[in-house]
Amino acid sequence: MSEDNQPTCDHCQQPLGNRYIALERRIDQVRMLSEDDFEHGEPEWGPDADDDWRDEDDGPDLIEGIEPLDAEEVASYCGQACWSVAEADWIERLGLQTPYPEEGVMVPCSRCGAMIDRTQPHVSYNMSDGEFTTDADGNECMMIHEGTCLAVLCNGCEAAEVSEESRLVPETADAVGRDLGC
Ligand SMILES: [Zn+2]
Ligand SMILES: [Zn+2]
């Protein structure tokens, strides 16, 4: 990161330190992960802490995992104090009736209340308290101290469109076997 292009807090305009709060607009999709998905280490998107959503009786236990298909940082704040001032503005700007949705597969849209099936791509706004650190090899990485979902929105409120360039995940296996032609 260059010194003279220091990012600043969107509220107080002070330069951001290594630790700051980021608000991200994401396209999320909930996937059911089986134990096998963790065999070679954690998948990129990581499991949701909530593991009470289990598969009934066939196959291994499934864990609900959120797979971000796209993510864009829309704002950043130097700390909790600035975020808590900005929070009300965001809730108003996004027209949220019920911010901070519960976890789960079927949740109401934070704006209009329509039920969202989170296994389908949908827009979400998330804030994360993260810190840039340097690992043993000298690579910068982001350590997330805390992440909170501010809103989930139905496709009627904001369409979950993923552009090809910003797609975060590689082609998945379920693309194979479809489109065999007839
Ligand atoms: Zn600030
Ligand atoms: Zn909606």
Image (tube, rainbow, N blue to C red):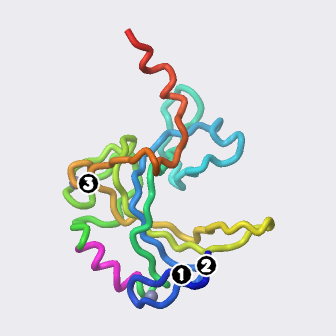
Looking at the rendered image, the disc whose residue lies closer to the viewer, 3 or 2, is 2
- Label 2, on which residue? 2
- Label 3, on which residue? 158
Question: In the image, which residues are magenta?
Answer: 83-92
Q: Amino acid at mark 2?
A: Ser
- Which residue: 44% across, 69% down? 127
Looking at the rendered image, the disc whose residue lies closer to the viewer, 1 or 3, is 1
- Which residue: 53% across, 26% down? 58
- Dot 2 surroundings within 10 Å: few (below 14), some, or many (20 or more)? few
* Quadrant location, the C terminus: top left
Q: For residue 111, which numbered disc appears in the image?
A: none
| Near-viewer residue (137 or 109) | 137
Is ligand 2 less than 8 Å from the beta carbon at label 3?
yes
- Label 1, on which residue? 5
Assign a secondary structure to mark 2.
Answer: loop
Taken as a whole, is the magenta stretch helix, strand or loop? helix
Q: CA distance from mark 1 to mark 2?
A: 6 Å
Residue 64: give x, y in percent of width and height.
50, 45
Residue 8: give x, y in percent of width and height.
47, 84
